[in-house]
Image (spheres, rainbow, N blue to C red):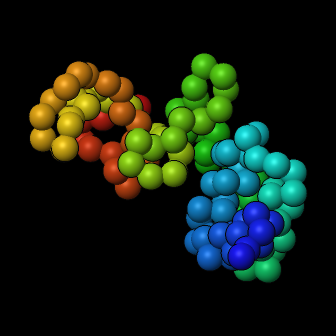
């Protein structure tokens, strides 16, 4: 049986570079210092420089939607930082609309009608 530390290391090793960059820049606040260190080590191993990290952090800061607590919003459909938001219907079984709600979108999931 794998320990939490082993699971975390495997998760970091298997994650794509963009996901790791998002975690260590945009979502750094909510992470344990040990996890941040492991991600930074993995990024260095993959050839990501300190300048690349700074550039990604600046891009996130410029484009991501900030919540009231100062943290970036997450896409409603994946773990990326959200760059747009829009109202939509929360649907049961993906069909029956129940109530309106705010959705957040990353660049990948952003519909044309979503506002920045």
Q: Quadrant of residue 66?
A: top right
Q: Position of residue 102 (x, y in %)?
A: 35, 26
- Name the quadrant of the C terminus: top left
At horizontal 71% and vertical 69% (from top left) the residue drawn is 7
Seen from the viewer's position, the closer of residues 24 and 97 is 97
Q: Position of residue 24 (x, y in %)?
A: 73, 54
Question: Quick check: 43 left or right of 70?
Answer: right
Question: Quick check: 79 left or right of 111?
Answer: right
Residue 33 in view:
yes
In the rendered view, tell whether residue 14 sits above or below residue 80: below
Q: Quadrant of residue 22?
A: bottom right
Residue 51 in view:
no
In the rendered view, tell whether residue 104 sits above or below residue 17: above
Seen from the viewer's position, the closer of residues 43 and 96 is 96
At horizontal 77% and vertical 69% (from top left) the residue drawn is 3
Seen from the viewer's position, the closer of residues 58 and 86 is 86
At horizontal 25% and vertical 22% (from top left) the residue drawn is 100
Residue sitting farthest toward the front: 1
- Name the quadrant of the N terminus: bottom right
Q: Position of residue 64 (x, y in %)?
A: 55, 39
At horizontal 15% and vertical 30% (from top left) the residue drawn is 97
- Mark count: 0
In the rendered view, tell whether residue 10 sits above or below residue 40: below
Q: Where is residue 34 in the image (x, y as percent from the top left)?
A: 87, 57
Question: Quick check: 106 left or right of 70?
Answer: left
């Amino acid at each position: 049986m794998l320990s939490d530390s082993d699971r975390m290391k495997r998760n970091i090793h298997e994650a794509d570079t963009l996901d790791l960059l998002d975690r260590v820049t945009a979502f750094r606040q909510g992470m344990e210092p040990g996890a941040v260190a492991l991600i930074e080590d993995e990024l260095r191993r993959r050839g990501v420089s300190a300048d690349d990290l700074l550039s990604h952090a600046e891009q996130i800061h410029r484009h991501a939607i900030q919540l009231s607590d100062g943290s970036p919003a997450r896409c409603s459909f994946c773990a990326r930082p959200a760059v747009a938001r829009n109202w939509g219907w929360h649907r049961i079984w993906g069909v029956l609309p129940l109530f309106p709600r705010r959705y957040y979108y990353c660049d990948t999931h952003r519909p044309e009608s979503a506002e920045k």
